[in-house]
Amino acid sequence: MRTCVFILILKAALAMALGTTGTSHQGFTVNAQQKPETAEVKIDNFSFAPGTLTVPVGTMVTWTNRDDIPHTVVSTDGAFKSKVLDTDEKFSFTFSKAGSYPYFCSIHPKMTGKVIVQ
Amino acid sequence: MKRMHEKKKDELLYDHNHDGIDRRGFLKCMAWAGTGAFCVMKGGVLKSYSLSSFSDLNAAEAKGELSFVQISDSHMGFNKPANPDVAGTLKAAVDKINALPGTPEFMLHTGDISHLSKPEEFDTVDQVLKSAAPKEVFYVPGEHDVLNDDGKQFLERYGRGSKGAGWYSFDKKGVHFIGLVNVMNLKAGGLGTLGHDQLEWMEDDVKHLKHSTPIVVFAHIPLWSVYPQWGWGTQDSAQALAYLRKFGSVTVLNGHIHQTMQKVEGNVTFHTAASTAFPQPQPGKADSPGPLKVPAEQLRSVLGITRVNYVQGQHALAVVDSTLA
């Protein structure tokens, strides 16, 4: 119980330290001044959009499934793997190394995409 | 139901004996869910009737000595348009099965039992199927049944006594049934996959069977190339079919595409069953294979079950689709 209270206080302190920006990246932010880069991939009509996404190192990419059918986001070479995403569910992965990351939906393998990290 | 009486479709004939009647081509009859088709194979010749001429067949032809039912793609847990009640339509399918003249001996479920591989989804299907007159059910997994755990739960529930990822074979009244798994280890950009181990097992499984043994193969994803652009095919199915070339009568039953479709090629009759949950578009007729949204009053006319009858001695295997309407 005491631990919980302590965490709450810490969170409040952190929020104050971050100022009034009120962004939702506190869980990932170590340095309060540097907002991490983010990028989005939408899953619509059994395809990833954009199909190829180019981002700087350190970017957190979030996939959102907007189909009526569940999909997954699975790296071809094992770098990342989502659980199954039902409608409107999201999966995020932060790319900390440069490179090319092809991925696909393991349920509908015709669905493929790529993240290029520079 | 109304459409069944609108017109009588032509009877189609196909030569299985390669005696020169129709050597070149294959018959491709596409029975869009809601119209239905009925196929009887006799003396190596397959006859296909639309359901409008179903009443022309005599009772013995329609019933057969071995009768079973295929259901598919119950997608328990799906709750979006066009079907917010997939448990209700599965119950309707069971009612349909229970109303058939003569109880089928068993059921085949060709996968996508659940929508998200959740235990409660499988539980609901098990519960609904308990009220079906045929008590024995044989399953193969769809890709929706093996999410997150590489099919561990599926094997625990339905795969007792099976090999590998859940493949197996059994015999009923002289007919050899082979249940295959083509939804595991799918590769980026690829189609359904059987894999080396399963193919090797299958080759061995059929090696000692007589050429006259009727074969029924069932798997989730079609074992023929329905529409590869949407992943509707199995990349190494040609190898599996090669092992079956020596047999006079091979019937392949699949699900996955949520619509009935048939093709006859050589000694093999391919057939896909309708879903009990929601329809999907005809190949290439939509931007994606996502659920086809139909008006509520039409839903049951595009869902259905498939009954298969085998008449011993007559070398006949009949496949009958009926909708839930």
Image (cartoon, rainbow, N blue to C red):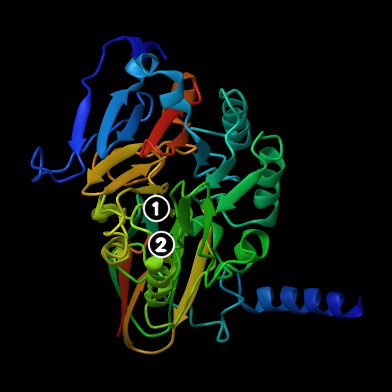
Judging depth in this view, the residue of B32 and A17 nearest the camera is B32
Separation of marks 2 and 1 at Cα, in angstroms? 7 Å
Q: Position of residue B73 (x, y in %)?
A: 50, 45
Residue found at the very far front of the displayed protein: B313
Residue found at the very far right of the displayed protein: A1
Amino acid carrying label 2: it is Leu
Q: Which mark is residue B213?
A: 1
Local crowd size for mark 1, using a 10 Å CA cut-off: few (<14), some (14–19), many (≥20): some
Residue B207 sits in which quadrant? bottom left
Residue found at the very far bottom of the displayed protein: A97
**Can residue B15 be seen?**
yes
Report whether B263 appears left or right of B169: left
**Are circles 2 and 1 on residues that touch, CB within 8 Å?**
yes
Q: Secondary structure at mark 2?
A: loop
Report whether B306 appears left or right of A118: right
Residue B229 sits in which quadrant? bottom left
- Residue depicted at 26% across the width and 42% down the height: B263
* B235 vs A34: above or below: above
Q: Which residue is mark 2?
A: B209
- Residue depicted at 51% across the width and 70% down the height: A82
Q: Position of residue B146 (x, y in %)?
A: 54, 63
Local crowd size for mark 2, using a 10 Å CA cut-off: few (<14), some (14–19), many (≥20): some
**Can residue A86 be seen?**
no
Judging depth in this view, the residue of B159 and B102 nearest the camera is B102
- Residue depicted at 10% across the width and 39% down the height: B22
Q: Position of residue B36 (x, y in %)?
A: 36, 26
Q: Position of residue B87 (x, y in %)?
A: 63, 36
Report whether A11 appears left or right of A94: right
* B298 vs B126: above or below: above
Amino acid carrying label 1: it is Thr
Judging depth in this view, the residue of B286 and B268 nearest the camera is B268
The answer as to whether the residues below labels 2 and 1 share one chain is yes
